[in-house]
Image (cartoon, rainbow, N blue to C red):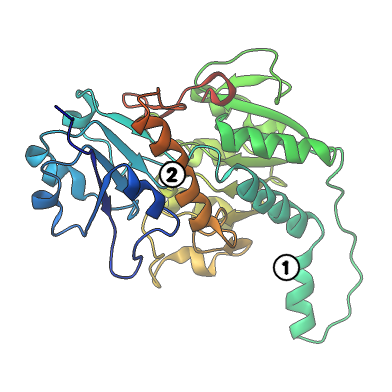
């Protein structure tokens, strides 16, 4: 007796449509599509679920209807919108877009630091005012950076910044003196005690119970007045009112923010008008072709899954991120 074809369910929206490039999977599995409203009915009988609508919280409401689900893949780096107790306690494997965004986000961070140190934002403002004013930019080479979050994206940032002469230290759950990508890794729960040693502070932590509100007034007050803060992790890991107050008091010197607690950032948010803040709409990893890369990754993983092989880089559902040796956060 032949076993039934496995069913792969894709959660998407009319705007997102179907991911390109996954058609070959139809030779080995039944592919079905649904939106959030249809998920409770569609999830019954599904063996795997692709969250193409990766920020949707719809899985928890539909969970009681899942009867065969074995694997969920999130087409994003962060999985904080997905995890809930019943899923965490289940045998369902969770994977994410591990590795897809490492280099694009690292390039965005490098660009943010260069724009700040080379006074590019000031130059643009002065150009619009038709003002010629000589100034002296800061050197990036020889400066120091603290990358908070030592997973794959944090390591990509460390390697790229190291290549241009920035001395990079990491901060993660567990401190240790030596590392392939960081000169050292410090315990992130002691952030205020050492954050003042660095010229640049970069947040790339996943959102967990431990990192929610991690960057508060105590951390900002401990930074150097000349420090520059970059957030490409999660918005809720920063207490935004504390950041606004700190920036208005002149320390840190500025911030590049790509993620926010509420997205889109409300027009009434004081961050829009805070001096020294550069705002971008959660695009640091979304280089041209990023959705094609996400679809290709899923096809590769689905092929392994259909072959019965173990899936690499699985998310630790209790911690909320991948814990492979190369991305120990």
Residue 79 seen in the current view? yes
Q: Quadrant of residue 94?
A: top left
Residue 132 placement (x, y as % from top left): 89, 80
Instruction: Name the residue nearer the viewer: 217 or 82.
Output: 82
Rendered residue at 86%/58% (across/down): 137
Give residue 14's position: percent from left, percent from top: 28, 69
Residue 13, image quadrant = bottom left
Q: Please, which residue is most extreme toward the top here?
A: 177
* Residue 229 in sight in this render: no
Q: Does dot 2 land on a helix, a strand or a loop?
A: helix
Q: Residue furthest front?
A: 1
User: Going 61% across and 48% down the picture, which residue do you hit?
Assistant: 105
User: In the visual, does 261 lie left or right of 3?
Assistant: right
Residue at the extreme bottom: 130
Counting labels gives 2
The one nearer the camera, 54 or 209, is: 54
- Front-most of 44 and 211? 44
Rendered location of residue 28, percent (x, y): 32, 42
The residue to which callout 2 is attached is 299
Residue 57 placement, left or right of 167 = left
Distance Cα–Cα, label 2 vs label 1: 41 Å
Disc 2 versus disc 1: nearer the observer: 2
Asked if 269 appears above or below 329 in the picture, the reply is below
Q: Nearer the viewer, residue 137 or 97?
A: 97
Q: Position of residue 133 (x, y in %)?
A: 88, 75
Q: Residue at x 74, y 57 (%)?
A: 116
Q: Residue 160 lies in what quarter of the image?
A: top right
Q: Are marks 2 and 1 in contact (CB under 8 Å)?
A: no
Determine which residue is flagged by label 1: 121
Q: Is residue 212 left or right of residue 34?
A: right
Using residue 168 as the reference point, say whether residue 88 is left or right of it: left
Q: Earlier in the sequence, mark 2 or mark 1?
A: 1
């Amino acid at each position: 007796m032949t076993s039934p074809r496995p069913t792969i369910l894709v959660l998407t929206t009319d705007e997102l449509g179907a991911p390109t490039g996954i058609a070959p999977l139809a030779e080995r599995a039944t592919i079905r599509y649904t939106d959030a409203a249809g998920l409770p009915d569609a999830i019954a009988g599904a063996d795997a679920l692709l969250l193409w609508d990766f920020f949707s919280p719809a899985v928890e409401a539909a969970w009681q209807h899942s009867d065969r689900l074995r694997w969920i893949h999130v087409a994003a780096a962060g999985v904080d919108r997905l995890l809930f107790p019943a899923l965490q306690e289940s045998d369902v494997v969770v994977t994410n877009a591990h590795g897809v965004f490492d280099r694009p986000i690292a390039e965005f961070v490098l660009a943010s630091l260069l724009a700040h140190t080379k006074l590019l934002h000031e130059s643009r403002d002065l150009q619009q005012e038709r003002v010629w004013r000589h100034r002296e930019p800061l050197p990036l080479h020889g400066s120091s950076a603290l990358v908070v979050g030592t997973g794959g994206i944090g390591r990509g940032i460390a390697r790229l910044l190291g290549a241009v002469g920035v001395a990079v230290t990491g901060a993660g759950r567990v401190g240790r003196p030596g590392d392939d990508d960081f000169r050292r890794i410090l315990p992130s729960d002691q952030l205020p005690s050492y954050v003042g040693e660095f010229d640049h502070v970069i947040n790339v932590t996943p959102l967990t119970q431990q990192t929610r509100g991690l960057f508060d007034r105590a951390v900002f007050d401990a930074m150097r007045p000349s420090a520059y803060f970059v957030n490409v992790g999660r918005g809720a890991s920063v207490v935004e009112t504390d950041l606004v107050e700190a920036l208005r008091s002149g320390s840190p010197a500025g911030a590049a923010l790509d993620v926010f607690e509420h997205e889109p950032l409300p027009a009434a948010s004081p961050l829009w008008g805070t001096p020294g803040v550069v705002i971008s709409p959660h695009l640091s990893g979304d280089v041209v072709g990023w959705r094609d890369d996400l679809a290709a990754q899923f096809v590769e993983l689905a092929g392994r899954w259909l072959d019965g092989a173990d899936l690499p880089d699985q998310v630790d559902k209790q911690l909320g991120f991948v814990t492979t040796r190369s991305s120990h956060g």
